[in-house]
Structures are given as structure tokens and as C-alpha cells.
Image (cartoon, grey):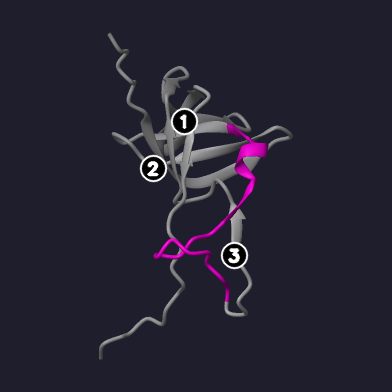
Amino acid sequence: MSAKKKEKTSLIVAFMGGSGQKSTSVSFTTTNGVRPWAWIENEIVTKQVAMLDTNGNQAVDKSGKPIFRNQIRAGVTLLVSEVRAMGNPETSYVEDGIEISLQKPKQQLLLGGNDMEIIQPQFQAMTKLAVAE
């Protein structure tokens, strides 16, 4: 009898937050009106990876130089085997004694497992925008 493989949770990076000495705050696309986020080790976030074009080839800039970017950035998809919510979603915070409401509640996640997959988006060179008159 074989064990059923657990399905991974897909998280799409929306934007990068602040970095600390060991980790970076990474926010994901909104789910059910809540913005999930998690701390991810800087070593994982800042690893440089080659950009690929829409044909799967190494992307290059105008001078023909290969393009590299941080492994985790906006647009990247993370497939994670264990995801746990840390407490309840936050709807406000206090700054200088004043309570400030968040437009979107945010929920801290704990990402676990040792088999996170990082799926890079395909790179497309920018093209001129055609404007119809």
C-alpha cells in the first residue's frame, strides 16, 4: 500500500516587504479578502537565478548580457508542502498610540516542509505600446 502524496499549496508572490538580518517578509496574492505573508530566509530569497524567455532560453538584455534576478520576487510561485496560519488575521495596528485599520487584513503564515518548489515566471522583453487613435 503506497502513501498518498500530499498536495502542495500554491502561493504567488505579490510583493517583497522589509528584510531583517536573517529573513525577508514576503507577501502573497490576496485569498478570501486576506493578504497572506511569511518570513523567508534571505539566503533563499536573494539567490540569483537566470531569467528564461518564453521559449525557455536564457533571457538577455539589449547588449546580449544574460539577465539574472533574485530567486524570490513578485510574480514567482511557491509550492509549499506545509502551510500554517499564525494566529488570527490582523485588521489593524497601533502606531504612536493611534489604531490604524488595514485596507486588507493580513495573515502571517508559517511555511514548512523541506521541499519548497520555486517556479519562475517567463521573462518577456518589454515592447512598445501601440495606442489606437
The residue sitting at 67% across, 38% down in the picture is 43
The residue sitting at 61% across, 67% down in the picture is 66
Q: Which residue position is annotated with label 2?
A: 29
**Which badge, 1 or 2, comes first in the chain's sequence?**
2
The residue sitting at 46% across, 50% down in the picture is 120
Q: Which mark is residue 92?
A: 1
Rendered location of residue 28, percent (x, y): 43, 40
Does 20 sit above or below residue 52?
above
Mark nearest the camera among 3 and 2 is: 3
Rendered location of residue 79, percent (x, y): 42, 35
Rendered location of residue 123, percent (x, y): 46, 63
Asked if residue 42 lies left or right of residue 119, the reply is right
Rendered location of residue 3, percent (x, y): 32, 13
Q: Which residue position is annotated with label 3?
A: 67
- SS under mark 1: strand
Mark nearest the camera among 3 and 1 is: 3
Q: Considering depth in this image, is 55 or 107 the residue closer to the camera?
A: 55
Q: CA distance from mark 3 to mark 1?
A: 40 Å
**Residue type, numbered disc 2:** Thr
- Residue 110 showing in the rendered view: yes
Q: Is residue 124 magenta?
A: no
Magenta part of the protein: which range? 40-61
Does 56 sit above or below residue 75?
below
- SS under mark 2: loop
For the N terminus, the image quarter is: top left
- Residue 99 showing in the rendered view: no
The residue sitting at 45% across, 17% down in the picture is 87
Q: Considering depth in this image, is 25 or 99 the residue closer to the camera?
A: 25
